[in-house]
Amino acid sequence: MELVEADIEKKEIIKRYRSLLRVWNTKDKANKQLVRKAFDFAMEAHKDIRRKSGEPYIYHPLEVATIVAGEIGLGTTSIVCALLHDVAEDTDYKLPAIRKNFGEKIAWIIDGLTKIDRMIEGPGSSLQAENYKKILRTLSEDVRVIMIKLADRLHNMRTLGPLEKDKQLKISSETFYLFAPLAHRLGLFEIKSELEDLALKYTEPEAYFSIQQKLEATRPDRTRFFNRFIYPVKRDLRHRGMNFEILVREKSIFSIWQKMKNKEIPFEEIFDIFAVRFIIDVPFEKEKEECWKVYSIITDHYRPNPTRLKDWISIPKSNGYESLHITVMGQDGKWVEVQIRTRRMDEIAERGLAAHWKYKGIKSESGLDEMLTRIREILESQETNSAGLMDDFKMNLYEHEIYVFTPKGELFKLPKGATVLDFAYSIHSNLGNRCVGAKVDGKNVPIRYELKNGDQVEIEVVLP
């Protein structure tokens, strides 16, 4: 019987390895050989280790590597590190062996992953705040460390069932507190949403399963509505000769739960449960023009709500997100959220920073370099308070952004509620230290003045 089980497990390992190669889809022979070497090394290192579920441990690094390649879109170095990420921590093969076999860079990334594991103590303490600062420092040094760690956490959340209840709650709390915000900051929207949903499943199981059941029960009605809604728009897009794809995307369970809680309303009163997404294939130089053409076609059929237009194509979000969002009145008097974007924009929305690397030669104005530079600047400051840093970082994730201008017309993005002093510090810490007030659109205002979208701000400083 044991021989039969061993044979079944061996076939499953081969199946998962082939799945990794399939989503990675590289033709480079040398890279394939390096990944195979890492797979063999991990197999040997983990050969006698099993997970809590009883499965061979090697399933985990294989799945993490598959997430890294397929869902995040990283390359050879990251795949190798994903396969080896638990070797130094959990087996007899330590960092020197990894360095000897795979080189300094891979050893450095794996060392960073191991250190992050040791930093995570659980939310709420000053130690955790200090660890958050260390994790952000790792982010600013090599973001791949954080992205591989996010893939590791995602697979752990997907397989959390066999663990004890208290362990499930601890890991889910960490996921809410640290990993979902990091995924959001890196533009990994799909991973962020799944992390939140899975964490909710263990922290609020009744709410999670109730919403899940209601979503499934109402899905046929939404499908019928979607098909009727897109029919005239699809016909006109085809008539114009446009190459496009139309998707319906449901709100995550966590987002629905949050809205129910914040607005104190039942599931039945949430009307924006899904959004219709139009994805067009166009050359980079025609992206903006063609997206607005799609907008024009949609609004020929459905009346738009002018207060709900969001143009993140002209001014992308700070995590690089680009899309045109509108809300229109569909059939039966129902408001429908519509997202319009290009294939490039959609890949960036799905894969975040990894997709930005891919398109770097096409468009470098992503805001991510600015974000990493800002993190480095904050961390290098001797006056940085770790808890304050953490709160500020998380505030920047979930609050709406505003856009303000310098006297020369340079654009800055700030969280909603930012003051003149916040703006001064966002330019440079020395400017913040010397700021005594400002002129906003030509009028004198104090340092605590709350800025609004479109303000033009001239900082006034005390002379040294």
Image (cartoon, helix red, strand yellow):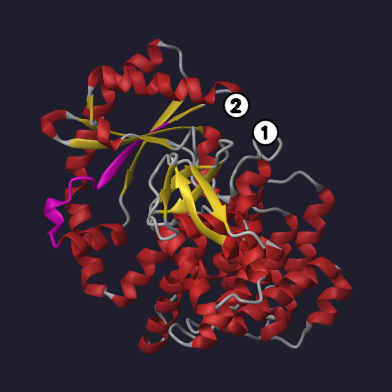
> Disc 2 marks which residue?
284
Compute the Cα span from label 2 to label 1. 8 Å
Residue drawn at 32 percent across, 71 percent down? 201
Q: Where does the image place residue 227, in percent across and percent down from the top left?
A: 25, 30
Residue 267 forms part of the magenta stretch = yes
Q: Is residue 39 above or below residue 188?
A: below
The residue depicted at 34 percent of the width and 14 percent of the height is 236
| Residue underneath mark 1 | 362
Q: Is residue 341 left or right of residue 306?
A: right
Q: Which residues are magenta?
A: 264-278
The mark found on residue 436 in the picture is none
Say which of 142 and 453 sits in front: 453
Q: Are marks 2 and 1 in contact (CB under 8 Å)?
A: yes
Q: 325 or 201: nearer the eye?
A: 325
In the rendered image, residue 182, in percent from the top left (x then y), is placed at 52, 64
Secondary structure of the residue carrying tag 1 is loop
